[in-house]
Amino acid sequence: MGKCNFRVGFGYDVHKLVEDRELWLGGVLIPHTKGLLGHSDADVAIHALCDALLGAAALRDIGFHFPDTDPRYKGIDSKKLLVEVVKLLKTHGYSVGNTDLTICAEQPKLNPHIPEMRQVLANCMDVDVDCVSVKATTSEKLGFTGRGEGMSAYATVLIVKE
């Protein structure tokens, strides 16, 4: 049987928007009137990325490794979770090849923050910034995202056996 030297992973996450929370997306604090609700900082983009990376290595999901029932992760900066996921991949002999992340939100406009998100995520994963794609889209006012009730994110990754 052949070995899997290249693996692809997909991740998805969603969080509700609420008052009195900071909005963290892609590791960047975004000025907005609402933030995402969650046990951690609720960075929907990083959570989708972590799930994609873990899935690519067949290492389950973010909730398995960082359960919301564990007080150690209450309010944690999701960048720390991403760094831990990349370390876990390395212990299994994998490195990050490239990532493609899509954030779905009606407001605020994310385009001005994308270069910083790419750099922050690249630093967390120890890859060149050109290996990190971040895109923003809306849901054209449809569904919970369109009504401004929450945000979602989708991530695809390639990991490589070292």
Image: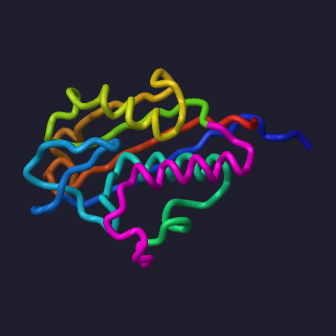
Total labels drawn:
0
Q: Position of residue 45 (x, y in %)?
A: 36, 46
Residue 84 falls within the magenta-colored stretch:
yes
Q: Position of residue 2 (x, y in %)?
A: 88, 39
To which quarter of the image does residue 31 belong? top left
To which quarter of the image does residue 78 belong? bottom left
Residue 12 falls within the magenta-colored stretch:
no
Query: Which quarter of the rendering shows the C terminus?
Result: top right
- SS assignment for the magenta stretch, majority: helix
Q: Position of residue 157 (x, y in %)?
A: 55, 37
Q: Is residue 114 above or below residue 31?
A: above
Q: Residue 65 vs residue 109: left or right? A: right
**Which residue in the rendered view is the most extreme toward the top?**
130
Which residue is located at x 19 percent, y 42 percent?
30
Which residue is located at x 27 percent, y 34 percent?
137
Q: Is residue 143 visible?
A: no
Which residue is located at x 31 percent, y 58 percent?
42
Q: Position of residue 35 (x, y in %)?
A: 18, 55
Which residue is located at x 18 percent, y 55 percent?
22
Query: Which quarter of the rendering shows the N terminus?
Result: top right
**Which residue in the rendered view is the most extreme toward the right?**
1
Q: Is residue 81 visible?
A: yes
Query: Which residues, given as a range, are shown in magenta?
Result: 68-95
